Amino acid sequence: MSTTSGIKGQLTVRGARTHNLKNVDLTLPHRSLIVMTGVSGSGKSSLAFDTIYAEGQRRYVESLSAYARQFLERMEKPDLDAIEGIRPAIAIRQKNSIRNPRSTVGTTTEIHDYLRLLYARVGHTFCRNCGREVVRETAEVVARRLGDLPPGTRILIGFEMPVVTSAPLARTREQDEEETAVAEPEEESGTPQPDIPGLADPVAETLALLRRKGFGRLYVDGRAVSLEDADAAMLRDRASLQVVVDRLKIEGDLRGRLTDSIETAYLEGGGAAFAIQLPSAADGDAGDPFVHRFSERFECRACNILYEVPQPRLFSFNNPFGACPLCHGFGNIIELDMALVVPDASRSILQHAIEPWSKPHYRSQLTELKRAARGRVRLDVPWSALSDEERRFVIEGDGAGFEGVKGFFRSLERKKYKVHVRVFLSRYRGYLTCTECGGARLRREARDVRVGDRTIDVVCAQTVRDADAFFAGLELSEKDAAVSDKVLREIRKRLGFLRDVGLDYLSLDRLSSTLSGGESQRINLATSLGSALVDTLYVLDEPSIGLHSRDNERLIAILRQLRDQGNTVLVVEHDADTIRVADVVVDMGLGAGEQGGRVVYAGSLSGLLQEPRSLTAKYLRDELAIPVPAVRRRATTQRLRVLGAAEHNLKGVDVEIPLGLLTCVTGVSGSGKSTLVHDVIYAALKRSKGDWDRRVGTHRKLEGTEFVSDVVLVDQAPIGRTPR
C-alpha cells in the first residue's frame, strides 16, 4: 500500500491500544537505529512486538498466495486505528524456541551448508587404511602420466577380461556325468554317455568375443600373443585374460592416442586398465616388465576400498545418504547410562549404590550379587573406590550364574510389552555418544575427506574462534582457491558475524536447543546480517541481556551494521550504552501497567536528557542510582561446597557458596557460569533431595546439602501457559 509516510521514509502509528497502550501516536524514521526504553510494564513490548511487528508480519503474510499462507502462523490484527509506512518485519526475541534435535549453530547460521559445498568441491579423500590420497584417474590424467615416461619407452595398454560363458545352458562334461550317476546308479559301469550338444568352452567363447570386438592380442606369460596363436587349452585354468588394446613407443606427442586407448581399456575393463612398461633396449630387453595399474573408479587400489565421490549430501547429517547409519545423524544413541544406574558414586553396594536394585521388587538381584561377589568384589567400599575389574564384574557379570547389571536390563527388555517395565527402563537410559561415528553424526566416508588437514566433523567441533583462525590461515592450491573463493568468503563472513556478537566461544556443532535465550537471539542477529536483507524492519528484545560489558561494543557495532545495510532496527533495551548510540530514543512511561502505556518522549538522546518527566533520563543524568547497601548481611557458618566441578569447560573448579546471602556468579560469556550453577549445583542439590533422575554435571563432591531443604531454578523459560 503506497502512502505518504512510506514515500517519506517514515513509520507512522496512530491510535495504538494493544494491552495497556493509551491511544499511542508515534512517527519513526526508517533506516534508523531506534531504541525503545522505559520501566518494566510500561508498554514497550506491546508497542514494538504486539503492534508494529505484528502488523508488519500480518501484512507480509497476506501478500502471499493462499497456498503459502496455510503453512504460516496467522496473526490477529492489532488494536489500532492505522499504521502507515510499515515494512516486512522480523522479530528476534529473547528466547530459544528451537526444539529440533538436529539443529546446530552451524546449520542455523548456514555455515554448515557452505562447509558441505566446500568439502564437496575441494575436499581430498584419504584412504582410512593406508593414508594415501584417493583419486579418480581419468583417461586424460593417465595419458599425461604415461606421456611423461622417458622417450623410447615401450608400453602395452590393456585391460583384464574375466573368463565367463554367455551360454546359460552350457554345461561341463563332469557336471553331466555326476548328474547321470545320481539319476542312474545301476548304469555306473555301462557305456559312456555321448557329449550333450551345446557345451561351451568358456575360454574359447571369451576369445571369440574378443575377436568380434576387434581385439588382436593377449598378454600371456610376459609376452604379447596374437589371438590366432592363443591356445585355449593353455588358458583353460585362467580366471581372466589380459587383453592388449594398444602397443606403442613413447615418441613425440602421443597424448591423443594414449587417451583413446585408455578410454577403450576403461570401457571394456569395467573402469580398470593397465599399462605394461617393457624393458628398454638399453638393458638388452632383459629384466621384468613393470605394470602400471589405473582405475577411473573412486577407490584406493592398494587397499581395494571403494569410496564415495564427495558431494554436498554426503556431508549432511540431515540427509539419510550422509547420516551415520547407527545414530541416524543425531550423534548419540539411547543406551543404558551407568551414571543413572549408580547416581551417587560415594555409596557402597551395601548402601544401595546400584539404584534399580534398591527397589523392593528387584532386591533379589542384590542378593544374587552378594553371593556371586564373595571374595571378588568389596561390597562395603564406595563405588568410586572400586577397581575397574570389580566394577566390570558387577556390570558385565561372570558369564556363568551371575548376569550383571547389563544382563539384568537385557532380561527386562524381553518384558517391554508391560507398561511399568518400559517406564522402569526409561529411568536408566540416557543419550550416549554414538559408538559408530563418535558423535560426528556423519557416515565414515564423509569423515575421510579433508580440506587442509581437517575433516568436516573436526571443523564443526571447533569453536567459532578456532574455526575462524583455521579458515583465515587456510592455504589451497591455485585451482582449489579459484573454485572455493566465494564459498570461503561466505564462511569467513558468517564466522565474523558470530565473533562480533560475542559468540566466538560456541562450537559449530553445539545444539541450538541448548542455547540460552540471549545466545539464540544473537545467533539470529548474526544470521540476519548474513542474509543481507534490505528495507526490512528488525525488532529486537533486549539483545544485551546475558552479554558481558566486554562484548557490548561489538553488539552495538552489529546493530549499526544492520542499519547501514538499509534496514530499520527497533530495539527494546535498558542498556545505557545502547540508548546513547541510538538515532531515535522512545521512552515509555510514566509508570508500569495502568500508569504506563504512553510515549513520554520520542527523539534524539540530547532531547531525552532534558525531559523532566522521564525516569530513564534521571538515571542517565545520574540523578537517580541503585543504592549500594551501607551495611552488608553477615554470613553464617553454613556453606555449600562444590569440589572438582569439571562439566563442559570447567577445569576442576572448587567453590564455596555462603548460605543465607545473595551470591552473584559473573564472568564473560562462555566462561562456565550456567554450567556451574545449572548443570552442577542445581542438579546435584535436586539429586540429593531425591528429585532428579537425569544426568548431573561432572563433579567430585557436594558438601552442605543438609543445610538446604529445597532448591528452585528460576530461569528465562516461561512459568507456564495455562489460562488459569
Image (cartoon, rainbow, N blue to C red):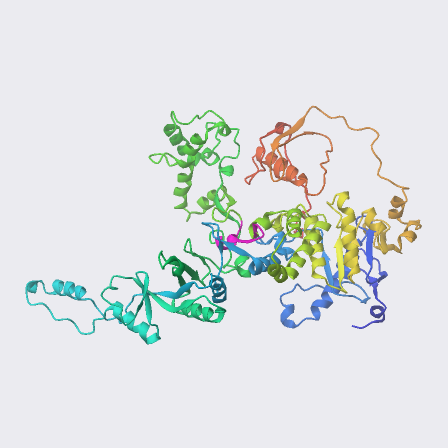
In this rendering, does residue 221 appear at all?
A: yes
Tell me what residue is drawn at x 84 percent, y 58 percent. 22
In this view, 492 is above or below 194: above
Location of the N terminus by quadrant is bottom right
Place residue 250 in its image quadrant.
bottom left
Q: Residue at x 63, y 27 (%)?
A: 704
Q: In x, y percent, where is residue 421?
A: 44, 44
Q: Is residue 443 magenta?
A: yes
Q: Is residue 203 left or right of residue 250?
A: left
Left or right placement of residue 225 versus residue 536 in this view: left
x%, y% of residue 471? Answer: 64, 52
Instruction: Please tell me which residue is depicted at 67% across the width and 55% down the height of the picture.
Output: 492
Question: What is the quadrant of residue 114 in the picture?
Answer: bottom right
> In the picture shown, does residue 714 fall above or below 175?
above
Classify 92 as above or below 252: above
Q: Is residue 625 left or right of residue 522?
A: right
Magenta-colored span: 440-455
Could you tell me residue 522's position as x and y percent?
A: 71, 51
Answer whether residue 174 is magenta in the image: no
**Between residues 322 and 413, which one lies in front from this camera angle?**
322
Residue 602, by quadrant, is: bottom right
Q: Residue at x 71, y 36 (%)?
A: 665
Q: Position of residue 413 (x, y in %)?
A: 41, 45
| Residue 521 appears in the picture as rendered | no
